[in-house]
């Protein structure tokens, strides 16, 4: 089966690319390197010993998408491409709406024209806003607190409307919880260019000595130790979820959303302590004020993905910390 990955050189895309190539898929990738680097292409080839076709370009540009669909018999698309920095989306909402919505609409129009109606979409646990209870199930009320999250919610709505208009589409909406970790080779991983907003990339900066200290945003949350609780998921487990979703939409039309998380919530201090134990590297931290917009706790009920996609996680928090650190050492 020929699968197109948009944004396939990014953090989650590159790990999914490895899993698809290892599973024997014929993969085509487009990325504009807005938030990734060209050397990932060779690193994925080195890991898998397999080749894939790559196009450099922006998927808001219909011409390049037409070219890709004309030159390749694309049967399914995994749509990762998008901007993802929550804080930046608050400051520059139009930039986020333009890129995330324009790219998706252009992609869907070209897919429809070429009668390619199988899609996996990267959504986020951010669409649950402040959840009414835990663990979070797919049928919970959806709301958002920032423009980035709103782009995800709008796109989910667009996909529902598209399916209503033509029920021969097969669409899997994947709502990721908190991906961390890296490929065990240490060749690919997450490498933010700017000061990281997310916890694990920040821990890595402190562990490497680049930053002196981690600021823990609040220790007065209603959690077991007062620090925020999240559902951290190893990026390789997450990538494998995409292979399962592709297998599912290959044979089933319809539209459905799936939580991809472990179902276990760990606190900021749990993550820091586990990182220190696994790597032997101390992580200096101080407790500071809460970050505006943060919630106490967020973790998935991932039973629907198990039931429908036959997907479950295999890796532990220790694996996530070890592999993140291994990637840091390689880079
Ligand atoms: P990433 O930034 O590492 O990867 C996205 C890739 O898309 C990058 O390589 C970027 O260059 C490319 N891209 C962006 N706009 C493009 C465009 N218009 N045309 C072509 N390429 C474009 O991000 P990621 O962490 O791999 O996330 C992938 C997807 O998953 C995103 O849609 C993101 O919103 C979503 N998501 C990520 C997380 C997370 O914590 N990483 C959580 C939930 C959802
Ligand atoms: C963030 C995004 C969310 C996105 C998710 C995964 C915000 C408000 N939300 O959520 O939309 O879906 O990433 O990409 O940005 N923490 C610290 N110190 C730090 C960084 C984080 O204490 O320097 C804490 C946070 O308060 C939180 C936990 O670590 O309790 C995880 O934070 P983070 O990695 O940013 O993820 P989310 O808050 O879940």
Image (cartoon, rainbow, N blue to C red):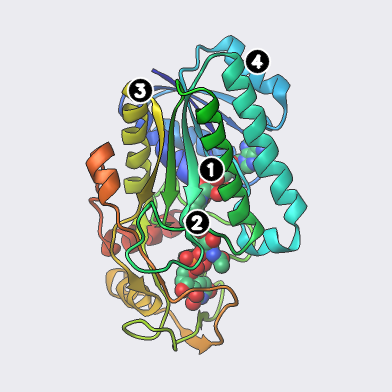
Residue 197 visible, this orientation: no
Circle 4 is placed at which residue position? 67
**Disc 2 versus disc 3: distance between alpha carbons?**
28 Å
The residues bearing labels 3 and 4 have C-alpha atoms spaced at a distance of 24 Å
- Compared to residue 178, the image places residue 17 above or below, namely above
Determine whether label 1 and label 3 are within 8 Å by CB: no
Residue 111 in the image: state x and y as whole percent: 57, 21
Q: Residue at x 60, y 27 (%)?
A: 108
First reached walking from the N terminus: tag 3 or tag 4? 4
Residues marked 2 and 3 touching at CB (< 8 Å) = no
Q: Nearer the viewer, mark 4 or mark 2?
A: 2
Categorize mark 3 by other alpha carbons within 10 Å: few (<14), some (14-19), many (20+).
some
| Residue at x 51% of width, y 63% of height | 129
Q: Which residue is mark 2?
A: 142
Mark 4 neighbour density, 10 Å: few (under 14) some (14–19) many (20 or more): few
- Eye-nearest disc, 3 or 4: 3
Q: How many marks?
A: 4
Q: To which quarter of the image does residue 25 belong?
A: top left
Seen as rendered, the residue at the extreme front is 164
Tag of residue 156: 1
**Earlier-in-chain disc, 2 versus 1:** 2
Sequence order check, earlier mark of 2 and 3: 2
178 vs 165, left or right, is left
Residue 180, labelled with which disc? none
Residue on which the image places disc 3:
250
**Few, some or many C-alpha atoms within 10 Å of disc 2 (few <14, some 14-19, many ≥20)?**
some
């Amino acid at each position: 089966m020929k699968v197109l990955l948009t944004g396939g050189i990014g953090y989650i895309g590159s790990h999914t690319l490895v899993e698809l190539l290892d599973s024997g898929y014929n993969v085509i990738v487009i990325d504009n390197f807005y938030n990734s680097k060209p050397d990932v292409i060779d690193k994925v080839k080195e890991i898998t010993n397999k080749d894939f076709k790559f196009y450099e370009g922006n998927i808001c540009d219909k011409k390049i998408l037409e070219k890709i669909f004309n030159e390749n018999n694309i049967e399914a698309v995994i749509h990762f491409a998008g901007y993802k920095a929550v804080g930046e989306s608050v400051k520059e909402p139009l930039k986020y709406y333009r890129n995330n919505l324009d790219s998706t609409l252009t992609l869907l129009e070209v897919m429809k024209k070429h009668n390619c109606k199988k899609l996996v979409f990267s959504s986020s646990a951010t669409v649950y806003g402040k959840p009414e209870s835990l663990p979070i199930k797919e049928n919970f009320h959806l709301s958002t607190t920032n423009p980035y999250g709103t782009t995800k919610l709008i796109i989910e709505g667009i996909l529902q409307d598209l399916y209503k208009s033509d029920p021969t589409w097969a669409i899997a909406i994947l709502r990721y919880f908190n991906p961390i970790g890296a490929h065990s080779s240490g060749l690919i991983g997450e490498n933010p260019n700017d000061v990281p907003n997310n916890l694990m990339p920040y821990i890595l900066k402190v562990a490497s000595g680049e930053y002196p200290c981690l600021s823990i945003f609040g220790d007065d949350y209603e959690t077991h130790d007062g620090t925020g609780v999240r559902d951290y998921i190893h990026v390789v487990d997450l990538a494998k979820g995409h292979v399962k979703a592709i297998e599912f939409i290959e044979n089933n039309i319809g539209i459905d959303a799936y939580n991809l998380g472990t179902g276990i919530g760990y606190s900021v201090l749990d993550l820091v302590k586990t990182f220190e134990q696994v790597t032997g590297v101390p992580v200096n931290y101080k407790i500071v004020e809460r970050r505006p917009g943060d919630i106490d706790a967020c973790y998935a009920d991932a039973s629907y993905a198990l039931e429908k996609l036959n997907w479950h996680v295999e890796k532990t928090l220790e694996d996530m910390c070890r592999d993140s650190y291994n990637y840091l050492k390689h880079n």
